[in-house]
Amino acid sequence: MRTTVFSTPCWKNAAERIGRALLLLLAFALLPLPARSADNASVVSARIEATEDGWQVHADFELSLAPQLFEAVRKGVPLYFIAEFELTRGRWYWVDQKVASARRERRVSFTPLTDQYRVVTSGIAQTLTTAEDVTRLLARIRSWTVAERGQLKGGERYEAALRFRLDGAQLPKPFQLNVLAAREWSVTTDWHRWTVTP
């Protein structure tokens, strides 16, 4: 009795291997990249203080926003900038306790009819005439309530952390590639950390 063995041509095996390798490369390319600190944004100063409304953050950033960002805004692409704050208390027996966290979003858009920029922060809109005015406004945070008064205990030691960044996830898809590839579109500060003792 004769047995017939069917074998796959070697070029088919090679094509399958190349196809798998290409899929693997594509998967790595689509992985989110870690946020990198850009040299066009940094935290100059930050502090937290107790007020009647609660614990409030005041901060100043050094921002050098590229002209490409404002060109995109003038063409109808809104930009979203995020300030993120965290307050933690260290524990020797367990992971640090997150006492408070807050996020403030600022949306920058342009109105061609009035030839003005519009910055919306927590539902409050401001109109500005120049890109320099927008940059100055973005570079300052004043009286941002991040925690209630009772959330911090007197005599305890806390660590505050603050950062500022352009939120690329809210951009249209073609511009999201710019955030990954172009340095001008990478606006991210490192986490600025300091100790708070009420």
Image (cartoon, grey):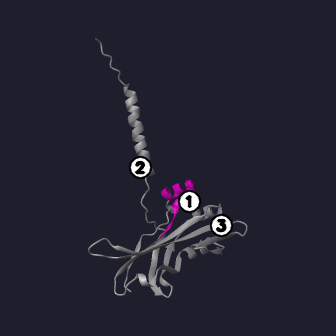
- Mark found first going from the N terminus, 2 or 1: 2
Inspect the magenta stretch and tell me whether residue 188 lies in it: no
Residue at the farthest front position = 150
**Residue under circle 3?**
110
Q: Which amino acid does label 3 sit on?
A: Phe
Inspect the magenta stretch and tell me whether residue 165 lies in it: yes
Tell me which secondary structure the magenta stretch mostly adopts. Answer: helix
* Viewer-side label of 1, 3: 1
Q: In the picture shown, does residue 68 fall above or below 17?
A: below
**Residue under circle 1?**
171
Q: Which amino acid does label 2 sit on?
A: Phe
Q: Distance between the residues labelled 2 and 3?
A: 36 Å
- Mark found first going from the N terminus, 1 or 3: 3
**Residue under circle 2?**
28
Q: Give the range drawn in magenta.
A: 164-181
Task: Give coordinates of residue 54: x percent, y percent.
Answer: 48, 84
Is disc 1 placed on a helix, strand or loop?
Answer: loop
Residue for point 40% across, 39% down = 20
| Residue 87 placement: quadrant | bottom left
Q: In the picture shown, does residue 142 fall above or below 166?
A: below
